[in-house]
Amino acid sequence: MSTRIYVLNGPNLNLLGTRQPEVYGHETLADVQQRLIGRAAELGFEIDFFQSNHEGEIIDKIHEARSRADGIIINPAAYSHTSVAILDALNSFEKPVIEVHISNIHKREAFRHHSFVSARAEGVIAGLGTKGYLLALEYFVEAGQ
Ligand code: DQA
C-alpha cells in the first residue's frame, strides 16, 4: 500500500493567486495541488488534497485521516492562530504532522506569531512560498513513511 498524505488547507486559501498576491504569490491552489500530485507520483505517494473555509470540515477531515493517512501537511491559515479545536483533532492523529505557511508569519502582525498547531507539528515551514508544501512532502521521504 502506498504512502498516503493528507494535504489540508484552511480558510481563504481557495483564493490563492488572486488574494493579496504581494503576500501569497500568483500561483493558485490548483497549481499547488498539481505540483504536489506530480512530485507524489515520482515518490510513489498518494495525495488527498483538501481545502475548506469551515473549521468543522477541517476537523472532520483530520478525523478521517486517523484511519486513512500516513501523515498530514496542514496550512490551517487563520485558524492556526485561533483554533484549539484543530489542535485537539491533530492530537488525535498518531502520525506525523507538518505545518506550512506560505508567508513568514513571524515577519507579519503580532497576532500571526502564535500558532496553536505548532505545539503538535513535527515541523513548521513558513515564508518559503508555495514551495513549502513540496518541502513538507520531502519530509515524509526522509521520515521513511
Ligand atoms: C497563512 C498565514 C496566516 O496568518 C493567514 O491567516 C493565512 C495564510 C500562510 O500560508 O501564510 O490565511 O497560513
Image (spheres, rainbow, N blue to C red):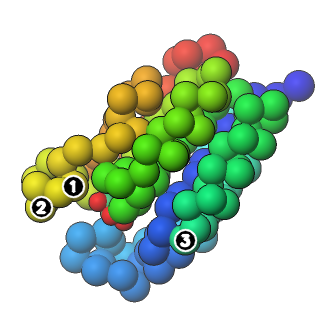
Residue at point 71%, 51% (across, down): 60
In the image, taking residue 102 as reference, residue 63 lies left or right, namely: right
Whichever of labels 2 and 3 marks the residue nearer the N terminus, that label is 3
Q: Residue furthest bottom?
A: 18
Quote the CA–CA distance across marks 1 and 2: 6 Å
Q: From the top left corner, tell me how far across and down residue 136 is, in percent.
A: 47, 37
- Tell me the tag on residue 112: 1
Queried on whether the Cβ of the residue with tag 1 lies below 8 angstroms from ligand 1, the answer reads: yes
- Tell me the tag on residue 53: 3
In the image, taking residue 19 as reference, residue 52 lies left or right, namely: right
Quote the CA–CA distance across marks 2 and 3: 21 Å
- Tell me the tag on residue 6: none
Residue bearing the label numbered 2: 109
Could you tell me if the residues under marks 1 and 2 are in contact, i.e. CB atoms within 8 Å? yes
| Location of the N terminus (image quadrant) | top right
| Location of the C terminus (image quadrant) | top right
Residue at point 72%, 41% (across, down): 63
Q: Residues within 10 Å of mark 3 (few under 14, many from 20)?
A: some
Residue at point 67%, 55% (across, down): 49
Ligand 1 is found in the corner quadrant, namely: bottom left
Q: From the top left corner, tell me how far across and down residue 58 is, in percent.
A: 61, 55
Please, what secondary structure does the residue beneath circle 2 have? Answer: loop
- Label 1 is placed on what type of residue? Arg
Could you tell me if the residues under marks 3 and 1 are in contact, i.e. CB atoms within 8 Å? no
- Label 2 is placed on what type of residue? Glu
Whichever of labels 3 and 1 marks the residue nearer the N terminus, that label is 3
Quote the CA–CA distance across marks 3 and 1: 18 Å
The foreground one among 106 and 21 is 106
